[in-house]
């Protein structure tokens, strides 16, 4: 036997990937609201498929072990989970910073206080509009605005920092000044003025949501003025619509670099819309540890880093800044998740994307297709807060 044949074949070491900074836990897809720009998938996961209390507690422990710093409790509406307090407490015990992303429509004061006592760190409250009637039409829930004002007052009385999230689109874009005033009145620390992003239900409703370029420019001016006016009192984050951009956003801070998303049934995704991409296999926390999934799963490896990139990304000096933009948007516009993000001016489809936006923005807005469990969508009368539970299962 030669010396050579005595050698044991050793696989080259797999490079370790730095842990994610943050995780979005979609505890449930149930929600009393039906916002037409929701980023949840059109096929919502039903209550029967949701992870158990024990499974979510294990996942939160694994996230802490992995080195994650922040957990965002989201949905759907996370407060409809009866065990949310247990999750917040466990996260706090494991040293995780917790953020509750909520509509404020499905929680009473006693339960909110339980979350505070359990160690919740931050609340992000969505508003559909500053104008109550319009907010009812967009959320499809009557009486929603008063509920939100009340909830916001509980948050401020608790001493927790409040972020107001205002999703902007062509049907509320003229009320941006009022949204900014609303955030100031509620004593929010931060306001997110976020143009609708076109994923999930947002993509299905794109023509009903797309603003014109002049509307976008007007909002940008107003936000810049408000930033000066409220400097030191209110931080304003501004998310622009990709369709009018010249350069893509660094979606999720790069695929599989900083962020993971867990669906109600436990599938682990690199972003909230990743399930739209054909050919990706999403491992579940029911069968694998989060560490294994983060390091090795096919879905996380597929667009991680820069090796997957086509030209012009491959030789572009921005490739480690925007990480090639958004894969889900490339799929939606180019039909190929591995294509250059069409929001980049270097993409051959950039002008197509722009004319799509301008064409939709100037046509009459179609009716909203409301976010519902039934894939039929459609339009129905606005529901009351009290009977909006029909969207909960
Ligand atoms: Fe980003 Fe690719 Fe455009 Fe360069 S060519 S800016 S890497 S999307
Ligand atoms: Fe999926 Fe941007 S939303 S990569």
Image: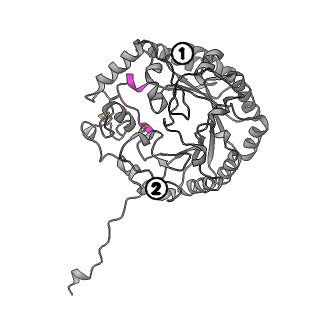
Q: Which image quadrant is residue 185 in?
A: top right
Where is 19 relative to 352, above or below? below
In this picture, is 218 found above or below 123? above
Was residue 35 drawn as part of the magenta stretch in this picture? no
Q: CA distance from mark 2 to mark 1?
A: 44 Å
What quarter of the picture does the N terminus occupy?
bottom left
Ligand 1's image quarter is: top left
The residue furthest left is: 2
Q: Residue at x 68, y 30 (%)?
A: 105
Relative to 358, residue 58 above or below: below
**Residue 144 location (% of width, % of height):** 68, 24
Name the one closer to the observer, 54 or 45: 45
Residue sitting nearer the eye, 65 or 41:
41
Q: Which mark is residue 225?
A: 1
Assess whether residue 245 is covered by the magenta stretch.
yes
Residue projecting furthest to the bottom: 1
Identify the main secondary structure in magenta: loop
What is the span of residues highlighted in magenta in the rendered image? 241-251
């Amino acid at each position: 036997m030669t010396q050579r044949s005595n050698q044991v074949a050793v696989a080259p070491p797999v490079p370790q990937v730095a842990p994610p900074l943050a995780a979005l836990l979609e505890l449930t897809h149930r929600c009393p609201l039906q916002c037409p720009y929701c980023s949840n998938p059109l096929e919502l996961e039903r209550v029967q498929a949701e992870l158990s209390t024990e499974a979510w507690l294990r996942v939160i422990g694994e996230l802490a072990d992995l080195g994650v710093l922040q957990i965002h409790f989201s949905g759907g509406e996370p407060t409809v989970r009866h065990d949310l307090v247990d999750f917040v407490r466990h996260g706090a015990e494991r040293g995780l910073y917790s953020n509750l992303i909520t509509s404020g429509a499905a929680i009473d004061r006693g339960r909110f206080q339980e979350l505070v006592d359990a160690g919740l760190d931050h609340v992000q409250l969505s508003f559909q509009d500053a104008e109550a009637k319009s907010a009812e039409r967009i959320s499809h829930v009557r009486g929603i605005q008063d509920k939100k004002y009340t909830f916001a007052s509980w948050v401020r009385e608790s001493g927790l920092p409040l972020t107001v999230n205002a999703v902007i689109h062509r049907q509320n874009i003229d009320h941006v000044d009022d949204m900014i005033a609303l955030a100031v009145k509620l004593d929010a620390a931060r306001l997110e003025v976020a143009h609708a992003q076109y994923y999930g239900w947002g993509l299905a409703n794109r023509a009903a949501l797309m603003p014109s370029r002049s509307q976008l420019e007007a909002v940008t001016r107003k936000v810049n003025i408000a930033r000066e006016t409220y400097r030191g009192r209110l931080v304003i984050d501004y998310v622009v619509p990709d369709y009018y951009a010249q350069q893509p956003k660094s979606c999720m801070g790069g695929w599989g670099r900083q962020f993971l998303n867990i669906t109600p049934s436990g599938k682990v995704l690199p972003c909230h819309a990743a399930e739209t991409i054909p050919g990706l296999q999403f491992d579940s926390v029911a069968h694998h540890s989060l560490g294994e999934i983060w390091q090795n799963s096919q879905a996380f490896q597929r667009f991680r880093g820069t090796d997957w990139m086509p030209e012009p990304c491959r030789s572009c000096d921005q490739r480690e800044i925007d990480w090639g933009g958004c894969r889900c948007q490339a799929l939606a516009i180019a039909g190929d998740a591995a294509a250059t993000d069409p929001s980049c001016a270097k993409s051959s489809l950039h002008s197509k994307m722009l004319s799509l936006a301008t064409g939709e923005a100037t046509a009459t807005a179609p009716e909203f297709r409301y976010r519902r469990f039934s894939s039929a969508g459609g339009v129905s009368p606005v529901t009351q807060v009290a009977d909006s539970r029909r969207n909960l299962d």
